[in-house]
């Protein structure tokens, strides 16, 4: 009897790990750039290019409630938030973090590969300025 209980617990633990492991393995096995695509390519409904030149790419971002932007990458960037928002950010290693943004504020981000989901109840909008040829931080 006790061994059956242990087997059930073991199966539950394994089942809980499967999504995280699958995500991590897929990210590691994908060729460079294949799993982490340009956000305009994979999130064309949510990200529109406003301006692009040799120094920056400026994006208009609009994510509806419940909408998820697939795995993508950004270089170092600055975001200016036009609306309040509650987002769930999943990094390439499977780590998940819920973040809140306030309208009228801004934030810095180092280069990142992630999935973003709007878990709030209203549209989230921002202007994102991606830096090109940015020197790495020390």
Image (cartoon, rainbow, N blue to C red):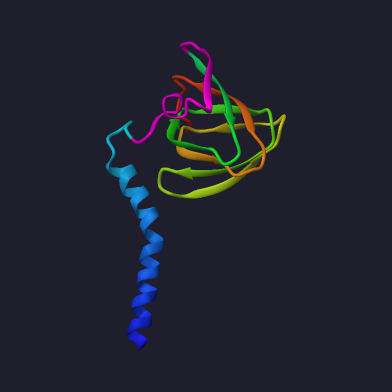
Give the x, y percent position of residue 71: 42, 37
Quadrant of image for the N terminus: bottom left
Q: In this view, does 113 lie above or below 127?
A: below
Q: Give the range drawn in magenta.
A: 35-54
Which of 138/29 is in front? 29
Q: Is residue 115 above or below residue 59?
A: below
Q: Hey, which residue is sitting farthest bottom in the picture? A: 1
Image quadrant in which you'd find residue 88: top right
Give the x, y percent position of residue 127: 61, 24
Q: Does the magenta stretch include residue 45?
A: yes
Give the x, y percent position of residue 91: 45, 43
Q: Is residue 10 above or below residue 46?
A: below
Name the side, left or right, on which 84 lies relative to 27.
Answer: right
Give the x, y percent position of residue 85: 65, 38
Q: Is residue 56 above or below residue 85?
A: above
The residue under the point 31% across, 48% down is 25
Number of numbered labels in the structure image: 0
The residue under the point 53% across, 28% down is 46
The residue under the point 66% across, 42% down is 121
Q: Hey, which residue is sitting farthest right in the picture? A: 104
Name the side, left or right, on which 110 lies relative to 85.
Answer: left
Which of 15/132 is in front? 15
Q: Does the magenta stretch include residue 114?
A: no
């Amino acid at each position: 009897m006790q061994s059956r209980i242990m087997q059930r617990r073991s199966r539950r633990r394994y089942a809980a790990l499967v999504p995280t492991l699958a995500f991590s393995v897929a990210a590691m096995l994908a060729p460079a750039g294949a799993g982490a695509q340009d956000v305009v390519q994979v999130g064309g409904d949510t990200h529109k290019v406003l301006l692009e030149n040799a120094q920056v790419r400026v994006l208009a971002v609009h994510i509806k409630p419940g909408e998820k932007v697939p795995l993508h990458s950004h270089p170092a960037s600055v975001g200016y938030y036009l609306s309040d928002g509650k987002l769930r950010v999943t990094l390439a290693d499977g780590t998940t973090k819920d973040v809140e943004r306030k309208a009228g504020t801004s934030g810095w981000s180092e280069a990142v590969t992630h999935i973003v989901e709007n878990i709030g109840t209203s549209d989230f909008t921002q202007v994102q300025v991606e830096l090109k040829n940015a020197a790495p931080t020390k």
